Amino acid sequence: MLIHQSENLPQTAKNDYPSLAPQPELAQGVAIAGIIDVGGAPKIIVKAPGERVSRYVQVGDYLSNGQVLVKRIEKYQSPSPVVVLEELGQEVYKEVGEGMAQEPSKLTQQPSLTNGAGETMAMMPQL
């Protein structure tokens, strides 16, 4: 029995694999410098990829031109809180100090911070 292949069928390359879903590279590149309590509301000190300086954000804010959501803080009162970011529908977990050039212990040695008005704001307790 002979089988003839039709010349009208499309030819596919042997290496045609479905492309992988895009990765949350911007969220993975976010550095978390710390979390402070300002009037009972946690503020997160972050440095997003492509941004020259760190800044304060809170849950619900967006980074990287609206591409990365600051979704929540887990283990807020623990010694190592985790900030959950979301990009492309994927969650990325970042510990305080992760992604910083300095060691995390050096980032938390300051007992307090001051804002632009000179008011002292307490750092999160290190248990």
Image: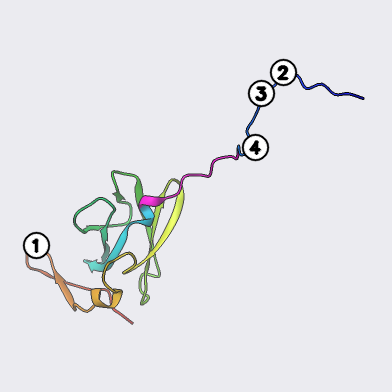
> For this view, does 117 lie left or right of residue 70?
left
Q: CA distance from mark 1 to mark 4?
A: 61 Å
What kind of residue is marked 2?
Glu
What kind of residue is marked 4?
Lys
Q: Tell me, yes or no, whether the two marked residues, 2 and 1, touch with CB atoms within 8 Å.
A: no
Q: Tell me, yes or no, whether the two marked residues, 1 and 4, touch with CB atoms within 8 Å.
A: no
> For this view, does 123 lie left or right of residue 9?
left
SS at mark 3 in the image: loop
Which percent across, then down, holds residue 30?
A: 32, 57
Question: On the image, numbered disc 3 is attached to which residue?
Answer: 10
State which mark lies toward you, 1 or 4. Answer: 4
Q: Earlier in the sequence, mark 2 or mark 1?
A: 2
The span shown in magenta is: 17-26
What kind of residue is marked 1?
Gly
Q: Tell me, yes or no, whether the two marked residues, 4 and 3, touch with CB atoms within 8 Å.
A: no
SS at mark 1 in the image: loop
Query: Would you say residue 113 sits in the magenta stretch?
Result: no
State which mark lies toward you, 1 or 3. Answer: 3
Q: CA distance from mark 4 to mark 3?
A: 13 Å
What kind of residue is marked 3?
Pro
Q: Earlier in the sequence, mark 1 or mark 4?
A: 4
Q: CA distance from mark 2 to mark 1?
A: 74 Å
The residue located at (38%, 56%) in the rendering is 28
Question: Eyeballing the image, is 99 above or below 63?
Answer: below
> For this view, does 100 lie left or right of residue 94?
left
The dominant secondary structure in magenta is: loop
Question: On the image, numbered disc 1 is attached to which residue?
Answer: 116
- Dot 1, how many residues are within 10 Å of its Cα: few (below 14), some (14-19), or many (20+)? few
Question: On the image, numbered disc 2 is attached to which residue?
Answer: 7
